[in-house]
Amino acid sequence: EFKHILHPNAILPVRINKQVISPSIVSTVLAFCFIYISIIVIGTLLMMAMGVGAEESMGCVISSIGNMGPGLGETGPAYSWNALPDAAKWLLSFLMLLGRLELFTVLLLFTPDFWKRN
């Protein structure tokens, strides 16, 4: 990035271990990161709309989609999700599936091209 700032018109390929990474792979990785972060933000906002606190919402969403670690606050390791509304539990269950089966695999099910018969 520093070379690109110094030479804004230069074409600098992305390299990992001195191997050039194709632009299609770079764009796929960026799309994955954007979708992952967007789902975390949307999931957190939905949880907050259901009356769950901000800290608990973010902790639950991140631990659900990442399939790791306990939540934060009232849903942390010493507590349970029993106090959460039923809709929040359904949302978190969907996020667990989404995280376990991978984003692109699950999102593929929601595309019309997947369901078209050839």
Image (spheres, helix red, strand yellow):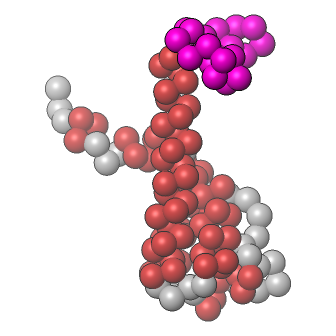
Q: Residue 87 falls in which quadrant of the image?
A: bottom left
Across the whole image, how many numbered discs are drawn on residues? 0
Towards the viewer: 96 or 62: 62
In the rendered image, residue 17, in percent from the top left (x then y), is placed at 78, 13
Q: Residue at x 49, y 54 (%)?
A: 38
- Work out which residue is located at the far right of the displayed protein and give it: 78
- Work out which residue is located at the far bottom of the displayed protein and give it: 83
Q: Residue 71 falls in which quadrant of the image?
A: bottom right
Image: 42 above or below 38: below
Q: Residue at x 28, y 42 (%)?
A: 111
Q: Residue at x 44, y 47 (%)?
A: 106
Answer with left or right where residue 64 lies relative to residue 89: right
Image: 109 above or below 27: below
In the rendered image, residue 60, in percent from the top left (x then y), is placed at 64, 71
Confirm whether the magenta stretch covers residue 68.
no
Image: 38 above or below 104: below
In the rendered image, residue 79, in percent from the top left (x then y), is placed at 76, 86
In the rendered image, residue 73, in percent from the top left (x then y), is placed at 74, 82
Can residue 115 be seen here? The reply is no
Q: Residue at x 77, y 64 (%)?
A: 69
Q: Which residues are magenta?
A: 1-20
Image: 21 above or below 64: above
Instruction: State which quarter of the image contains the N terminus.
Output: top right
Confirm whether the magenta stretch covers residue 15.
yes
Instruction: State which quarter of the image contains the C terminus.
Output: top left
Towards the viewer: 31 or 66: 31
Can residue 49 be seen here? The reply is yes
